[in-house]
């Protein structure tokens, strides 16, 4: 039995998420999410397919974490590194349907860079006033299909900052009443202090 979960806009303030074919409203109404995919696994609070601790209202509470992060701006988006989950999140400025709000495609990768590897590729020469990303960001940018084309060149050096990440579990109850996490919605602060929302199942990000 699949249980559809309703996320109130009061619970996630100014939530601006959408299905793939719908516009992103500036302030979303209550959002009904039906789980259809397996998550990437970068939400450490709840593992996919694992019964979770359930709050009094029947659903796990959101988990907020203070995280040491790194931010880098690109021509067509940005990347952040989250130290608690050793992950690199890619935010590409790709239009989603007819939305006029800041939004785009979201991708998550494990940080596979190890000390001793080349930090950049000397054969790749950036245009004037732009640069090739380094280390973990650079490895994802060079090696993951479509990332370089989606983001373009880095605009500036990476910047460390303190982020707040909140993970909201999306899942279902089985016939015995046990809850299983199957996907997540995240919110994360970026280097300028603004908030970004991520729909992990739809793989899109948005700002209110």
Image (spheres, helix red, strand yellow):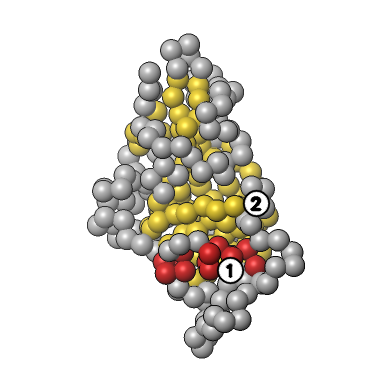
For residue 159, which quarter of the picture? bottom right
Question: To which residue does mark 1 refer?
Answer: 138
Q: Observer-nearest residue: 152 or 96?
A: 152
For residue 102, which quarter of the picture? bottom left
Label 1 Cα crowd, 10 Å radius (few <14 / some 14-19 / many 20+): some
Q: Position of residue 28 (x, y in %)?
A: 34, 44
Label 2 Cα crowd, 10 Å radius (few <14 / some 14-19 / many 20+): few
The relative height of residue 150 versus residue 164 in the rendered view (above or below) is: below
Q: Residue at x 42, y 69 (%)?
A: 149
Q: Residue at x 66, y 72 (%)?
A: 119
Would residue 200 be seen by someone viewing this image from the given angle?
yes
The reply to whether discs 1 and 2 touch (Cβ–Cβ < 8 Å) is no
Q: Position of residue 49 (x, y in %)?
A: 52, 28
Query: How far apart in space, not on screen, are marks 1 and 2 (Cα)?
Result: 15 Å
**Quadrant (top left, top right, bottom left, bottom right) of the N terminus:** top left
Q: How many marks?
A: 2
Question: To which residue does mark 2 refer?
Answer: 86
Q: Residue at x 74, y 64 (%)?
A: 115
């Amino acid at each position: 039995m699949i249980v559809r979960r309703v996320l109130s806009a009061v619970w996630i303030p100014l939530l601006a998420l959408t299905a793939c074919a719908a516009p992103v409203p500036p302030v979303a109404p209550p959002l009904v999410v039906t789980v259809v995919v397996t998550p990437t696994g970068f939400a450490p609070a709840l593992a996919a397919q694992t019964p979770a601790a359930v709050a009094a209202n029947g659903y796990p509470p959101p988990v907020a974490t203070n995280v040491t992060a790194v931010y880098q701006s690109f021509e067509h988006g940005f990347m952040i590194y989250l130290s608690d989950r050793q992950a690199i999140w890619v935010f590409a400025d790709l239009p989603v349907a007819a939305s006029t709000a800041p939004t785009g495609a979201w991708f998550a990768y494990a940080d596979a860079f190890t000390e001793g590897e080349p930090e950049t590729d000397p054969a790749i020469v950036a245009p004037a006033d732009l640069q090739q990303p380094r280390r973990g960001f650079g490895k994802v940018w060079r090696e993951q299909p479509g990332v370089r084309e989606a983001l373009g060149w880095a605009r500036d050096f990476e910047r460390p900052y303190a982020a707040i990440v909140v993970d909201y579990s999306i899942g279902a109850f089985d016939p015995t009443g046990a809850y299983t996490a199957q996907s997540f919605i995240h919110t994360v602060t970026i280097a300028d202090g603004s908030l970004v929302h991520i729909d992990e199942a739809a793989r899109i990000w948005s700002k209110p």
